[in-house]
Amino acid sequence: MSNPTRTYLDFERPIAELDAKIEELESVSERNGEDAPNVAEEVAKLRQKSADQLRQLYAKLDPWRKTMVARHPERPHLKDYLAGLITDFEELSGDRRFGEDNAIVGGLGRFRGRAVVVMGHEKGHDTQTRLKHNFGMARPEGYRKAVRLMDLADKFSLPVLTFVDTAGAYPGVGAEERGQSEAIARSTERCLTLGTPMISVITGEGGSGGAVALASANTVMMLEHSIYSVISPEGCASILWRDGAKARDAAIAMKITAQDLIGLKIIDKIIGEPVGGAHRDREGTIKAVGDAMEESLSSLEGLDPATLRRKRRERFLAIGRSLMEPAA
């Protein structure tokens, strides 16, 4: 059976129409049984046509369509990765200064046999959980909790794994009053001074300082259809053109896709997604992310703290330098 509850993006309308037809024919087949011998053949043809169109659509996504895919509500979120990759997970809450921030979830666990500290942004999957996690937009206490967890990792020589998926840090008055920018800066600084391996994956949106605060790692990877940018396309369009409707133009101009960013050496690796995006094969995506993280973590094991800090520092200082070098 096809999935009648699947959310389709605007550009996926032809796929939605085919899948609706498949669903209709399957219902007819169930009702009539052997009285509809040609239905199975027709369903198979439609499935093939749907798969071919899906493959063609996703082979040439522009940056704005990739933005839509990165924001897909059925895309795997942090808690899905925790359930699929981390065993013996023990969540640690609070920043020991103000309170708990559910937009960033983190704690201790085991990743394929290794003891690790793991954390990331959680957006939620329905109205109730989205409100609880503030749509993945962290307040200062979230970033101060992240610093506390990295201190713990440093103390016990544990690798740090982070999963980034946020539109950006929360811009509310209360967050600003409690030192939002300072908290983001402290978290970014703690990433850079960490004496243990740190691996970050942009799983959906990597928005502004809210993402960098958890992604200043030894290795930064992105899923194929995720985005990573200094500001959202809508925010950029409203500033440059005073017109949020020009978000597509902004997305293209800002170079926010994984394919753009690996060329600029801002990220280190692109993790492939199933045809049609991560939401169409959540288990396969989670496994692919785990395999990539394990490979990267293995390459960093055995390095002393000073070397890890130096390599991390050199990695970030090198960003943009190749663009300034004169052509030979």
Image (tube, helix red, strand yellow):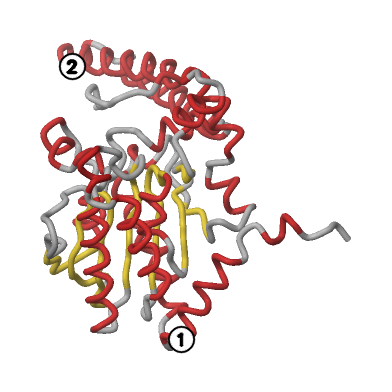
Residue 254 visible to the viewer: yes
Q: Look at the numbered disc 1 and give the secondary structure of its residue.
A: helix
Residue 245 badge:
none
* Rendered position, 79 above or below 153: above
Find the distance from the CA under tag 1 to the CA under tag 2: 69 Å
State the residue at coordinates (43%, 24%).
50
The C terminus - image quarter:
bottom right
Q: Is residue 113 visible?
A: no
Eye-nearest disc, 1 or 2: 1
Q: Would you call the spot at circle 1 few (<14 residues within 10 Å), some (14-19), or many (20 or more)?
A: few
In the rendered image, residue 153, in percent from the top left (x then y), is placed at 26, 76
Residue that numbered label 2 is attached to = 33
Who's the residue at 55% across and 21% down the image?
Answer: 241
For badge 2, the amino acid type reads: Gly
| Location of mark 1 (residue) | 306
Looking at the image, residue 323 lies above or below residue 304: above
Q: Name the residue located 24 percent from the left edge and 48 percent from the top edge.
A: 139
Count residues near mark 2 (Cα–Cα under 10 Å), then give few for <14, some for 14-19, many for 20+.
Answer: few
Label located before the other in sequence (1 or 2) = 2
Q: Position of residue 124 (x, y in %)?
A: 20, 40
Residue 19, given in percent of the width and then of the height, sits at 34, 20
Front residue of 173/287: it is 173
Kindly give the residue lying farthest to the right in the view shown: 328
274 lies left or right of 33: right
